[in-house]
Amino acid sequence: MSPEKMAMMANQIATFFKTQPGSDQAQRVADHLNDFWEPRMRQQLAAHVEAGGDGLDPLVKEAFALVRVPAE
């Protein structure tokens, strides 16, 4: 998947959770990524974040610290 498409998908998740009440939006984004993104997608997200995370919503970047990235 292209980095642009991956960023768009992750940003859509962040946009949704920004509208939800509470102060745990980053945790909710991370939970969604952990529960619904396959390991390969999470590895691609990790590589994108490590390369600077161009185009990622700040909430996605914050949530990334809580994402389980499988070993390659």
Image (cartoon, helix red, strand yellow):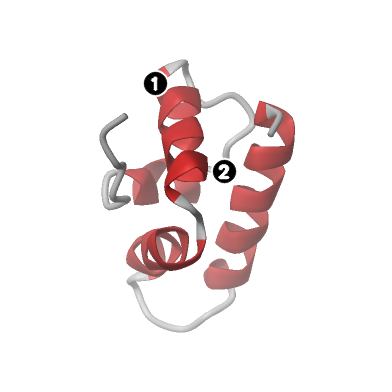
Residue at horizontal 53%, vertical 70%? 17
Q: Position of residue 19 (x, y in %)?
A: 59, 75
Q: Are marks 2 and 1 in contact (CB under 8 Å)?
A: no
Q: Nearer the viewer, residue 41 or 54?
A: 41
Q: Position of residue 49 (x, y in %)?
A: 44, 28
- Residue with the most extreme front position: 72
Quarter of the rendering occupied by the N terminus: top right
Label whose residue precedes the other's in the sequence (2 or 1): 1
Q: Estimate how packed mark 1 is, as few (under 14), some (14 to 19) or many (20 or more) residues with alpha carbons within 10 Å.
A: few
Q: Which quadrant holds residue 43? A: top left
Does 31 sit above or below residue 70? below
Instruction: Locate the C terminus and report the quarter of the image it occupies.
Output: top left
- The image shows residue 5, relative to residue 72, as above or below, that is below
Of labels 2 and 1, the one closer to you: 1
In the rendered image, which residue does mark 1 sit on? 50
From the image, tell me which residue sits under label 2: 57
Residue type at the position of mark 1: Glu
In this picture, is 72 found above or below 52?
below
Judged left or right of residue 53, residue 31 is: left
- Under circle 2, the secondary element is loop
Give x and y (percent) for residue 62. 36, 46
Residue 55: which quarter of the image? top right
Residue drawn at (40%, 69%) of the image: 28
Residue at 46 percent of width and 15 percent of height? 51
Q: Is 12 rendered above or below residue 49?
A: below
